[in-house]
Image: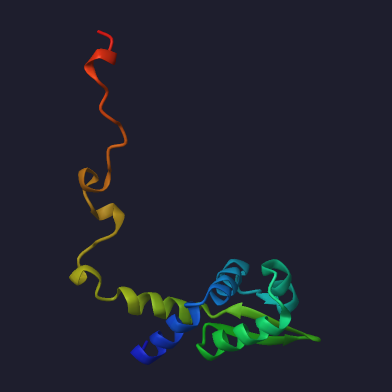
């Protein structure tokens, strides 16, 4: 993915309604959802929804297909994965850096509080 495409995708997702729409479509999977179902589930007015769908489509994050008299929208999983790869390709200088690669002594914070000795029974 080129930097310009990544910026376009991130800009499209940097708005609450569009992020919610995209996340809903990711959850729906490749089958996607009709615009009416998206509006219903997210309680977004159809006039606003069409604007947000257009922005996500221009960023290549969603695709639309005709199904009878309905337009079905679905997440563009290839573009989503390309964006994730773009954002993480140089992560930690190529070294493993996820939660599983960090020693537990570093990641685990103690949740116990000190108890005064007078409260501890022998």
Q: How many marks do you count on the picture? A: 0
- When the figure is inspected, residue 114 is found, relative to residue 43, above or below; the finding is above
In screen coordinates, is 78 left or right of 87? right
- When the figure is inspected, residue 32 is found, relative to residue 27, above or below; the finding is below
Q: x, y percentage for residue 19?
A: 53, 73
Query: In which quadrant will I find the N terminus?
Result: bottom left
Q: x, y percentage for residue 122?
A: 25, 8
Applied colour scheme: rainbow
- Quarter residue 47 falls in: bottom right
- Quarter residue 96 falls in: bottom left
The residue at the far top in this view is: 122
In screen coordinates, is 65 left or right of 3? right
* Residue at 27%, 23% in the rendered image: 115
Q: x, y percentage for residue 25?
A: 60, 72
* Residue at 73%, 70% in the rendered image: 40
- When the figure is inspected, residue 23 is found, relative to residue 105, above or below; the finding is below
* Residue at 24%, 75% in the rendered image: 90
Nearer to me, 90 or 46 = 46
* Residue at 31%, 73% in the rendered image: 88
Q: x, y percentage for residue 97?
A: 25, 61
Nearer to me, 98 or 13 = 13
């Amino acid at each position: 993915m080129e930097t310009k495409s990544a910026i376009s995708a991130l800009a499209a997702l940097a708005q609450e309604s569009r992020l919610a729409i995209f996340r809903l479509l990711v959850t729906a999977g490749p089958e996607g959802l009709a615009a009416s179902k998206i509006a219903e589930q997210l309680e977004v007015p159809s006039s606003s929804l069409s604007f947000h769908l257009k922005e996500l489509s221009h960023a290549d994050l969603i695709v639309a297909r005709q199904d009878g008299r309905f337009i079905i929208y679905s997440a563009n999983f290839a573009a989503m994965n390309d964006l994730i790869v773009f954002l993480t390709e140089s992560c930690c200088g190529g070294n493993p850096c996820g939660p599983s690669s960090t020693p537990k002594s570093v990641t685990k914070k103690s949740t116990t509080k000190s108890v005064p000795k007078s409260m501890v029974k022998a």
